[in-house]
Amino acid sequence: MSRGFGRGNASVNAQVKEMLTGIAERLETRRPDEPLTATGRLAMIQATTMDPVLFRALDDRVPRVDEESDEEGDKAVHEPVLRKDFAVQVREIAEAM
């Protein structure tokens, strides 16, 4: 049994799978050729659920968008990940659940 409000892991996993599929659909249909930032990733999860248990479960499963700092603490330049490419990763995670 999960510690989250008495919900079992199977229930949480089923909800997370459904939410991951919805996230992938939104990424594919809304501005698919624009880049996704780390802030955008977090906003996407927050827009999907405000439930603390589900938020943590999504945050654990949705891949991170890399943002590293160089020696001076400045953000390093990375090749941006497009929303449609990120959607493929999210959909694969949902299908594997």
Image: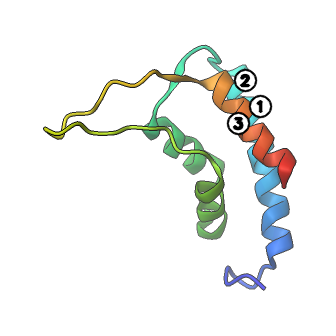
Eyeballing the image, is 60 above or below 27?
A: below
> Residue 4: image x %, image y %?
67, 79
Secondary element at image label 2? helix
In which image quadrant can residue 91 be found? top right
Secondary element at image label 3? helix
Q: For residue 25, which numbered disc appears in the image? A: 1
User: Which badge, 1 or 3, is on the more N-terminal residue?
Assistant: 1
Q: Label 2 is placed on what type of residue?
A: Glu
Q: From the image, which quarter does the C terminus lie in?
A: bottom right
Residue occupying the point 63% across, 48% down: 62
Q: Are marks 1 and 2 in contact (CB under 8 Å)?
A: yes
User: Which badge, 3 or 2, is on the more N-terminal residue?
Assistant: 2
Eyeballing the image, is 61 above or below 79?
A: below
> Residue 40: image x %, image y %?
49, 36
Badge 1: residue crowd in 10 Å (few <14, some 14–19, many ≥20): some
CA gap, disc 1 to disc 3? 12 Å
Q: For residue 28, which numbered disc appears in the image? A: 2
Q: Is residue 20 shown left or right of residue 85?
A: right
In which image quadrant can residue 82 be found? top right
Q: Nearer the viewer, residue 22 or 73?
A: 73
Residue occupying the point 70% across, 31% down: 87
